[in-house]
Image: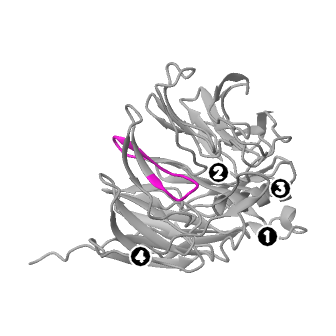
Amino acid sequence: MGKLSRLLLAVLVGAGIAGCSSEVDVYVPVPVPEFENQIDLEVVWSSSVGTGVGKFFSSLHPAFDAERVYAASRNGDVYAFNKKSGSRIWHLDLDDEDENDNRRSARISGGITVREDFDTSVILLASENGWVYAVDGVKGELLWKHYTGEEILAAPAIDGDRVFALSSHGQLFALNMEDGSELWSTGDDSSQFAVRGDSSPVPVQGAVVFYGTADGKLNMVNQERGVLLNQIKVGVPHGSTRLARLNDVNAAPVVISDELYVIALNGQFQGFNLNNPSRPVWVRQYSSVANPAYDLSDIAITDQSGHVYAVIRTDGSERWSNTQLTYRNVTGPAYAGGYVVVGDYQGYLYWLDSATGEFRAKMELNSSGIYTAPVADEDTVYVVSRNGTLYAIREQRQESED
């Protein structure tokens, strides 16, 4: 389908708009919830990462390794900062690359993905212009770039000596990690009427790659040759219009040891055992396009209405639900200590008790809005605003007494 159609659908879904017949019903966001903060939060540091993503769809998010946190803007600015102080370590402008000379910008949309090996790190990004970039995380130097010829919206993935990138037309590319050369490509759902946005591929144990499709399925592909091994139906289309029948698997599947979890738009949330991925252990009626998060016992999800849920991994039963952020374009969740953290379109971050789902704190960061899920590194949460400000936030620490 055309890019304009995908963009329109992203706006419809992201704004909490759904077609129930031949017309479109618009749902108004609830006001910011009012409550007393029960924990004290502080912005440890903040820094600009360029112009951000503006009003465009983007799945760009911060990422970190042992020493650095990385962030990027749509126009190609990529930064590394010291995790503790927030001081800039390096800056790389991918817009300076020759392939972007005649483009509006580098249009970076997929990433950031980090692979850390001892004292080295490599970060991966992908663009709507069809490029995958590998950057030295320590030095900020471009290692290689590969042109796929396909728009890429989702973050690439790394497993061993392979990089995997999924295009917006459902084509999965396997690249050599050392030089970016193409090993194989497979799949195509370009004829699908779909939400703008794609499931990031999830490689497992050097053997297979899982990725979602626009027609409500989860594909399992052999890493060596790109052969389709299995296909799991997750989305369940319903309704009388094409919009109402959307059932994309946009959220990245979650693999935890021998457990597999996958959720679809207008579909189902399913839990599997990797030893038998053809039959779900449990099936529950939730739908989402945002990546889930997990802790030792639960999986947290955010649905299209802005409701946040915690589901028990073993049986899929609901531990709690928080429905007080309805239609506030709530981001995907992140577990940070004993909390689930989400952001919204007005730039608020919320800390929910991971055991009960009750609000524990909120912080207003930036009126341009939070568009992608926070990233948690132990007790520190990193989040980037639409206008390109990166924040490091944590619960205030008590001063030690002498």
At label 4, the amino acid type is: Met
Tell me the CA gap for discs 4 and 1. 36 Å
Magenta-drawn segment: 294-308
Secondary structure, mark 1, is: helix
Q: Which residue is mark 4?
A: 363
Q: Is residue 301 left or right of residue 136?
A: left
Residue 96: assigned label: 1
Q: Earlier in the sequence, mark 3 or mark 4?
A: 3
Q: Is residue 213 above or below residue 310?
A: above
First in residue order: circle 2 vs circle 3: 3
The amino acid at mark 1 is Asp
Q: Which residue is denoted by mark 3 in the rendering?
A: 5
Q: Is residue 306 magenta?
A: yes
As helix, strand or loop, the secondary structure at mark 2 comes to loop
Structural crowding at the residue carrying mark 2, measured as other residues with C-alpha within 10 Å and reported as few (<14), some (14–19) or many (≥20): many
Taking the spot 49% from the left edge, 56% from the top edge, the residue there is 307
Amino acid type of disc 3?
A: Ser
Q: Is residue 176 left or right of residue 251?
A: right
- CA gap between label 1 and label 2 equals 21 Å
Image coordinates of residue 194 in percent, x first then y, are: 76, 47
Q: Quadrant of the C terminus?
A: bottom left
Is 292 situated above or below 324? Answer: above
Quadrant of the rendered image containing residue 92: bottom right
Q: Within 10 angstroms of label 4, few (less than 14), some, or many (20 or more) residues?
A: some
Mark 2 sits on what residue? 155
